[in-house]
């Protein structure tokens, strides 16, 4: 049990860092300055960003580095503003999923998880640099290359 108390907060912190997440400072604009990406014709369909975001996404890279096949991290966003971060596969085995709430404001996703007996509460945000039916690219000011996700099948 003590090992779980030490490992789970470290995993959640690693997910936040590797996801390019940060909590903006009060009064600071958290969006990096970058032109919005233009999806390929028909790749977005007529769906809004909120509609495209809903579903399960698997992390495929961070910056220029591809994610190892021995590591599967997924993010699931629901219609009702809930999300789940789940390390489904790693060298140390799967981790319990971490649930929270999110809200979408323009191209910014604001995320929040409550404190548990094993983890602290977290608040952070990421900018959507590109989203299509099958691709999600998010970033934060301290991680401008961000992370790429593909729709999980």
Image (cartoon, rainbow, N blue to C red):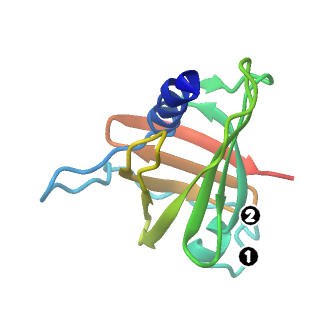
**Secondary structure of residue under mark 2:** loop
Q: Quadrant of residue 130?
A: bottom right
- Looking at the image, is 35 positioned above or below residue 4? below
Q: Residue at x 30, y 49 (%)?
A: 23
Who is closer to the viewer here, 59 or 37? Answer: 59
Q: Which residue is mark 2?
A: 133
Picture disc at residue 73: none
- Name the side, left or right, on which 147 lies relative to 120: right
Who is closer to the viewer here, 18 or 132? Answer: 18
Going by the picture, which residue comes out furthest to the bottom?
46
Who is closer to the viewer here, 153 or 42? Answer: 153
Q: Position of residue 108 (x, y in %)?
A: 41, 62
Q: Position of residue 59 (x, y in %)?
A: 67, 40
Who is closer to the viewer here, 83 or 39? Answer: 83
Q: Residue at x 62, y 42 (%)?
A: 148
Q: Quadrant of residue 50?
A: bottom right
Binning the other alpha carbons within 10 Å of mark 1 as few (below 14), some (14 to 19) or many (20 upward) gives few
Between the C-alphas of marks 1 and 2, the distance is 8 Å
Answer whether labels 1 and 2 touch (C-beta < 8 Å): yes
Q: Residue at x 87, y 53 (%)?
A: 153
Going by the picture, which residue comes out furthest to the left?
27
- Looking at the image, is 74 positioned above or below residue 42? above
Q: Earlier in the sequence, mark 1 or mark 2?
A: 1
- Name the side, left or right, on which 6 lies relative to 50: left
Q: Residue at x 27, y 53 (%)?
A: 30
Picture disc at residue 45: 1
């Amino acid at each position: 049990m003590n090992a779980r108390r030490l490992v789970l907060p470290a995993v959640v912190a690693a997910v936040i860092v590797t996801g390019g997440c940060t909590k903006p400072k009060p009064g600071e604009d958290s969006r990096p300055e970058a032109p919005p990406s233009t999806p390929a014709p028909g790749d977005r369909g007529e769906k809004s960003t909120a509609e495209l975001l809903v579903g399960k996404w698997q992390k495929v890279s961070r910056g220029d580095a591809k994610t190892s096949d021995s590591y599967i991290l997924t993010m699931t966003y629901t219609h009702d503003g809930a999300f789940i971060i789940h390390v489904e596969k790693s060298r140390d085995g799967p981790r319990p999923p971490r649930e929270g709430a999110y809200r979408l404001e323009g191209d910014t996703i604001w995320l929040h998880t409550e404190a548990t007996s094993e983890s602290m509460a977290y608040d952070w945000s990421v900018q959507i640099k590109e989203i299509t039916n099958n691709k999600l690219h998010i970033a934060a000011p301290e991680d401008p290359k961000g992370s790429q996700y593909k729709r999980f099948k």
